[in-house]
Image: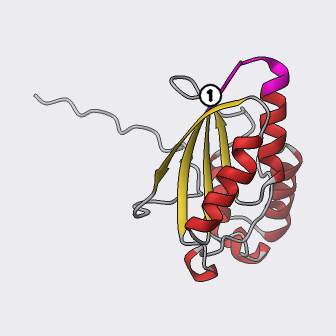
Amino acid sequence: MLPERIDAIDLRILDRLQGDARLTNVELAKAASLSPSPCLARVRALETDGIIARYVTLLDPLKLGLTVSVFIQVRLEKQIERTLDVFESAMHERPEVMECYLMTGDSDYLIRVVVPDMQALERFIVDFLARVPGVGNIRSSFALKQVKYQTALPLPSTKKPAAKRRRG
């Protein structure tokens, strides 16, 4: 559920920034139907509230030689707080770990790793992941093709549903 203070103008600002965070304030204000000063005030408020968490540049992994994308399921020997903390800290240390999720189901964690080749993946698994204290089982699945990759969150629509016409 959206915070009460988020309105249609804020959603337009967020939508535009998700598509292009390099927009100037003047361009953003025009897209949001505002003048620049109120637009900048709204962006600052969204940043202060933590709704805008950060600005990033997305890179093309293939053009950087990072051709292997792997999803790895990890099961821990025991699900105790100390083991969870150790594992999560270890994941934060590794730049090739792009995402890490605590899961329900058969595995405790799902991580996505991006590396240049199979040898790098082998080093990651054998020299690092398998040596993290508490890791009990590791299963890997290779991504053959990226069908969809999206960083923009689905924002709610602020449009009111159209009134139903009566037939008669």
> Which quarter of the image is occupied by the C terminus?
top left
Rendering quarter of residue 33: bottom right
> Which quarter of the image is occupied by the N terminus?
top right
Q: How is the image coloured?
A: secondary structure
Residue located beneath label 1 in the image: 108
* Percent coordinates x, y for residue 42 in the rendering: 81, 55
Is residue 168 positioned above or below 131 on the image?
A: above
Q: Going by the image, does 43 lie left or right of 6? A: right
Report the residue at 46% width, 55% height from top: 142
* Percent coordinates x, y for residue 167 in the rendering: 13, 30
Is residue 50 positioned above or below 122 on the image?
A: above
Rendering quarter of residue 86: top right
Report the residue at 58% width, 50% height from top: 153
Q: Which region shows up in magenta? A: 75-83
Report the residue at 75% width, 50% height from top: 128
* Percent coordinates x, y for residue 149 in the rendering: 50, 60
Question: Closest to the observer: 83 or 35?
Answer: 83
